[in-house]
Amino acid sequence: MIFIRLYINSNYKTVIALKPIQDNERFTLSKIVSDDLREYIVQNNLTTGDRLPSERDLSAQLNVSRVVVREALRSLEATGMITIRHGEGAFVNTDDPSIIFNHLLYFWKINNQNVKELLDLRILLEKSAIEQIIHHTDTSYLEALEKVIQKMELTNDPEAFKRYDAEFHMGLIQATRNGLFNQLADIILQYFNDMPSLSLTDIEKETTLHEHRSIINALKESNKEKALELLKLHLQHSKVFRN
């Protein structure tokens, strides 16, 4: 294994070197370079703010043109893994996965035949949230959820009702206090929230409100099994989220 010295964040640090790309690999150069840079970031445990080698150094180490390196860096920037600062270089970004999650949202939108699978994933996430929050001693989040239900009661606008419904379910996720969990769930809820609103009858409104209240009551009773079953039934037949 070859080792090189790079100056990163004002501290000298030993890092694993990049290997030159072979002639028989050149048919997908920019992809190979971006894949190698991803592995380079992982293998060297780089974190947010760490600077990657310059385009000149990367070009020399990988034996490719700076144009190819530049394309690879832009590709990584598009995924959110790095940030390119004009005149300064490329810096690692590990703190904000929202860009990657938004790529997922785009993928789901153009493959909307997978709505059922996405709903299954949403059910799993919210069920996991309930399993976590059922053991919390802090019940302040229940008061916040009840306020959301009150807002749902006062509106007859399907769009507003849908937003409040999403706010209710996001409140369940946020109660886990898990940032990554929250971001993924937020993207999934955004997907469903972007669906066209359906007409909202009084019966459908009252059914949704009743189911929300029932979930809250089960959480107050610390009845995990009941809360999980109520949540599953609610998400499976809720017209707010059905095509």
Image (tube, helix red, strand yellow):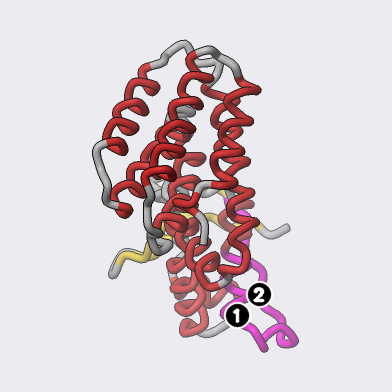
At mark 2, the secondary structure is: loop
The x, y position of residue 161, in whole percent, is 33, 46
**In the image, residue 19 lies in the stretch drawn in magenta:** yes
Between 117 and 101, the residue placed more toward the observer is 117
**Residue that mark 2 sits on:** 20
Name the main secondary structure of what is drawn in magenta: helix
Q: Is residue 93 above or below residue 130?
A: below
The number of numbered badges drawn on the structure is 2
The quadrant of the picture occupied by the N terminus is bottom right
Q: Residues within 10 Å of mark 1 (few under 14, many from 20)?
A: some
Q: Residues within 10 Å of mark 2 (few under 14, many from 20)?
A: some
Q: Is residue 51 visible?
A: no
Left or right, 143 with respect to 234, comes to left
Give the amino acid type for the residue marked by disc 1 in the picture: Asn
Judge whether residue 1 can be spotted in this image: yes
In-image side of 137 versus 15 (left or right): left
x and y, in percent, of residue 198 in the image: 40, 59
Tell me the distance, in whole angstroms, between the alpha carbons under discs 1 and 2: 5 Å
Image vertical order of residue 158 relative to residue 90, above or below: above
Residue 234 falls in image quadrant: top right
First in sequence: mark 1 or mark 2?
Answer: 2
| Residue situated in front as seen by the camera: 228 or 2 | 228
In the rendered image, residue 28 lying in the magenta stretch gets the answer yes
Q: Secondary structure at mark 1?
A: loop
Q: Which residues are magenta?
A: 15-37
The residue at which mark 1 appears reads as 63
Picture layout, residue 86 above or below residue 118: below
Q: Is residue 84 left or right of residue 6?
A: left
Q: Determine whether, in the image, residue 223 is placed left or right of residue 52.
A: right
Q: Which residue type carries mark 2? A: Pro
Look at the numbered discs 1 and 2 and tell me whether their residues touch, using CB distance below 8 Å: yes
